[in-house]
Amino acid sequence: MKRTAISFFFLALILVIAGCEKDNYDEPTSFLKGNLVYNGNSIGVRSNALQLELWQPGYELYSKIPVYIAQDGSYSARLFDGDYKLVRLAGGPYEVNTDSIDVTVSGTTTLDVPVVPFFVITGESFNYSGGVVTSSCNVSQVSTQPVNVDNVTLFVGTNKILDHRYYEQRHILSSPDISQPVNHSITLDADMADRDYVFVRIGVKTQGVNEYLYTQVQKLEL
């Protein structure tokens, strides 16, 4: 009986030591960061709706590392130094590209990830007068794929996180003529008009694609 108790004691001690060794693994201290870009410019997306994937070949546990993209198109991942493959996933407001990107992470490493949007928004402007928010922008197709605009929408909100899921007011133009500037106008609700400022951005949705491509969020003084 005494021998059995001693055996259980040593077994428990081994498990405790093994657990401590597992807990004492160093945390990653390096960073991979960058932006989703088209022609060198960061593109706006819905916050944390889209992902990149990182894979590190050569390890027994070969599993993906999900990397979420912020609404301004930036991303950041805390990693161990080493060689990785970065994969652009389908589902964004841009063409599918299955080619992986090889990247060596050492310390803080910056890598901008190029994408080809279906449409881009340029020359956006926002104004406020007499309780009305107006905007104007140009929408251009840059993809060579046969795609069409579903809608172009002006979003207004009280929070910096602003997209087609999180907004207070919006104005939708369905299938607009993008050969001309696209203009929006929203009469603010009374509680919105009483504020000192709101946040605004414009999004373009491609037919058959769930996610919008957005301008960067701007603060509009009232």
Image: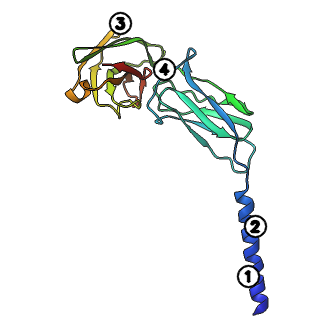
Q: Is residue 3 left or right of residue 198?
A: right
C-alpha distance separating marks 2 and 3: 69 Å
Q: Could you tell which of marks 4 and 2 lies nearer the N-terminus?
A: 2
Q: Residue at x 46, y 36 (%)?
A: 49
Viewer-closest of 172 and 95: 172
Q: Is 8 rendered above or below residue 26?
A: below
Q: 10 Å neighbourhood of mark 4: few (<14), some, or many (≥20)?
A: many
Q: Disc 2 designates what residue? A: 17
> Looking at the rendering, in which quadrant would you find the N terminus?
bottom right
Q: CA distance from mark 3 to mark 1?
A: 79 Å
Q: Is residue 216 left or right of residue 220?
A: right
Q: Amino acid at mark 3?
A: Ser
Q: Is residue 28 above or below residue 178?
A: below
Residue of label 4: 117
Q: Which of the marked residues, 4 or 3, is nearer the chain's N terminus?
A: 4
| Disc 4/disc 2 C-alpha distance (Å) | 52 Å
Q: Residues within 10 Å of mark 2 (few under 14, many from 20)?
A: few
Amino acid type shown at disc 2: Ile
Q: Secondary structure at mark 3?
A: loop
Which numbered dot is residue 179? 3
**Disc 4 element:** loop
Residue 18 percent location from the top left of the image: 74, 65
Q: Which residue is mark 1?
A: 8
Tag 2 secondary structure: helix
User: In which image quadrant can residue 22 be found?
Assistant: bottom right
Q: CA distance from mark 2 to mark 1?
A: 14 Å
Amino acid type, label 1: Phe
